[in-house]
Image: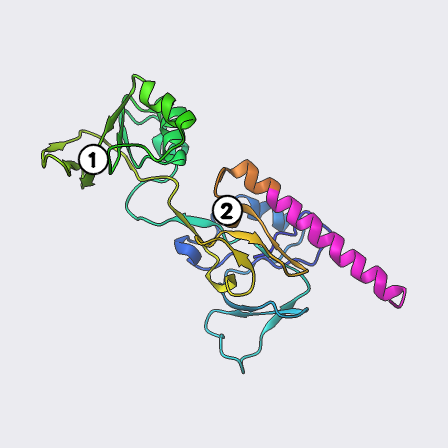
Amino acid sequence: MGLGCIANLNSVPFEGFMANGFAAGGQRTATQCLRFGTRIITETISRVDLSHCPFRYWREGQEEEDEESDTADTVIVATSASAKESGMSACAVCDGLNRPLAVIGGGGDSATEEATSKLTKYGAHIYVLVHRDKLRALDIMAKPLVDNPKISILWDTRWKNLWTRNVQTGSEKDLDVNRLFHDLSIHEPATAIFRTQIQTDPNGYIINTSVRGVFAAVDVRDKRYSQAITSVGSGCIAVLEAERLIVESQEKEMMGE
């Protein structure tokens, strides 16, 4: 929480310890931050108070009201999002590379786009498991999927292990695949501790922080692209906005406003 290593800020990123199900220390950006003197803390923030500035936050295990809290002049929420289902792949580029065969379950925009534009580059053949008799994706997204000769759509189909079952006919078959991808549109942003204090959509993605000094970046506000390059860009914007706000506040203090 907090990405200020590239700006002139006294930033303290909390990368979390198994926060959102991910182990700490796996990001290459950490090395770059350390070069700029940033202190990275491998602890999880479990509670925040954004009602007034300086903002208060508590580390995991210190959530009680009488426990001493840390404070910050600005907060950047960059807690990411993770796939809701476990045991399956969620990134076509990461897990589909050089795989001879892959499967996607789901028929939404994200799933159809990943199958058509990414998995077909790596998999020998792609099976798309759709739970009903039509795709949820927009027609403009669905047509390339339906027309692609490397893709087979299995309608009214659910999976169990790598067996599939047609819910209408009851027929079952075994798919000889080596990777299973779930519907890539089903992700959950790690914003639970913020949802009562800033505006989110029904799925928990941040729409508007609505609190001066609080900024949101990367996957907590982006459910459409979810790519590393777009995450870096939004993180950079949040840092620059935080720096600008702090500088403006300091200038006002110096002028006695």
Count of numbered badges drawn on the protein:
2
Query: Does 221 appear above or below 228?
Result: below
The single residue placed furthest to the right in the displayed view is 255
Q: Which mark is residue 32?
A: none
- Look at the image and give the residue range highlighted in magenta: 234-257
Q: Disc 2 on helix, strand or loop?
A: helix
The answer for how far apart the CA atoms under marks 1 and 2 are is 31 Å
Colour mode? rainbow
- Position in image of residue 209 (x %, y %): 60, 56
The single residue placed furthest to the bottom in the displayed view is 66
Residue beneath the point at 65% across and 52% down: 4
Verify CB contact (< 8 Å) between mark 1 and mark 2.
no
Residue beneath the point at 57% across and 78% down: 68
Q: Main secondary structure of the magenta part?
A: helix
Name the residue nearer the viewer: 90 or 44.
90
**Looking at the image, is mark 1 or mark 2 earlier in the sequence?**
1
Amino acid residing under circle 1: Asp
- Position in image of residue 65 (x %, y %): 53, 80
Is 242 covered by the magenta stretch?
A: yes
Is 60 covered by the magenta stretch?
A: no
Per the image, the residue denoted by label 1 is: 156
Per the image, the residue denoted by label 2 is: 219
Amino acid residing under circle 2: Asp
User: Within the image, what quadrant is residue 95 found in?
Assistant: top left
Residue beneath the point at 75% across and 52% down: 244
- 250 lies left or right of 114: right
- Residue mark closest to the camera, 1 vs 2: 1
Residue beneath the point at 41% across and 57% down: 18
